[in-house]
Image (cartoon, grey):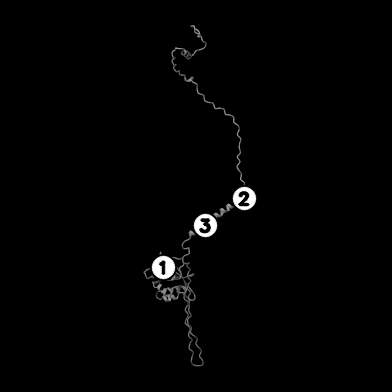
Amino acid sequence: MDRLTTGRRHVRAGSVHVTELINRQALRPGAPAPLAAPPTRTPDHARPRPTRPRPAAAEPTEPLERVMVVEPGSHRRPPSRGAQLAKLTSLGAATLVLCAAIATGAAISHQRSGETAADRPALRITGDQAMLPDQLERSLPTSGAARPPAPAATPAPEPVETTTPSPTASAPVPPAATVTAEAPRAVAPPVAAPMSDVALVRKFYELLPANPDSAFDLLAPDLLSSTLGEFLDSWSTVRRIDVLEVREHAEGVIAVVRLALADGGAMRVEQLLTVADSPRWITGAQLLSAQRN
């Protein structure tokens, strides 16, 4: 049952908040709904400041044990010092041999590149190709000149003067007991001196234009493979022969001649001819140079 209330106001110890009073009034039956209290603004200095979280204390950990990693060892024995020295010695020797081979190859290559065309052996033209004009002209290159290496010139020996003994008169025969006297003995004609190599070669070229048969007789039988008819047909293409130079050489006689050909051209030929002592004829012929104009 409800207590009767008197009109007395009970004194309450302590402070009473406004919100508490409003709540009490709202709880009464038939009481109007309380108005919402306007929001109150809390001053900045009264607001609680956010606090930073403190780092948690590091938890004590147990000390880690060090694990030694052992690499798998080879089953081979380590090389000895003597074996290492032997390998180094072999490597050094191989390097020296390689360097020597490279240096030798470079020297040989430089020597070959330094050679000139005159130092190289040239084609030797002998026999019919050196003596017959038609074959000589066919053997020339397209440029019209052939220059085989000429042998070194040597000074020609001084001509030796030859004297022939003059015929001497036979001594008179003392008179015999008879009145008639003997006739004087016949004296042999003087023997001509042998022809020199230079004179024989010059005579050969001088006989060719007018008397090629006699010039053919001055050649050794084994010098040419051509017959007399082929020799005459070949030299018939030459109209004139000019002997420019004939001189002695250590290997024979060098002759330089100029041939005037029937087609109007000319050819300058230098030959090395070999002359035998007995019988006196030309046994060898080599072409030194030829040039067609």
The spot of residue 87 in percent (x, y) is 60, 51
Badge 1 marks a residue whose secondary structure is helix
- Taking the spot 41% from the left edge, 68% from the top edge, the residue there is 138
The answer to which quarter of the image holds residue 137 is bottom left
Q: Helix, strand, or loop for circle 3?
A: helix
Give the camera-side residue of 140 and 31.
Answer: 31
Mark nearer the N terminus (3 vs 2):
2
Q: Pointer 1 and pointer 3: residues touching (CB < 8 Å)?
A: no
**Image point (52%, 57%), residue name:** 105
Residue 94 in view in this figure? yes
Task: Identify the image quadrant of the C terminus.
Answer: bottom left
Query: Which label number is shown at residue 105?
Result: 3
In front: label 1 or label 2 = 2
Looking at the image, can residue 239 be seen? no
Q: CA distance from mark 3 to mark 2?
A: 33 Å
Q: Amino acid at mark 1?
A: Arg
Q: From this viewpoint, which residue is outermost toward the left?
A: 264
Q: Secondary structure at mark 2?
A: helix
Q: Nearer the viewer, residue 122 or 240?
A: 122
In primary-sequence order, the first of circles 1 and 3 is 3
Using the numbered discs, state the Cα–Cα distance from disc 1 to disc 3 in whole angstroms.
41 Å
Query: What label sits on residue 138 in the rendered view?
Result: 1
Taking the spot 62% from the left edge, 50% from the top edge, the residue there is 83
Viewer-nearest residue: 16 or 177: 16
Crowding at label 1, few (<14), some or many (≥20) Cα neighbours within 10 Å? few
Q: Is residue 92 above or below residue 244?
A: above
Residue 261 location in percent, x, y?
A: 38, 70
State the image coordinates of residue 234 (x, y, percent, origin top left).
41, 72
Pointer 2: what residue? 83
Q: Amino acid at mark 2?
A: Ala
Q: Amino acid at mark 3?
A: Gly
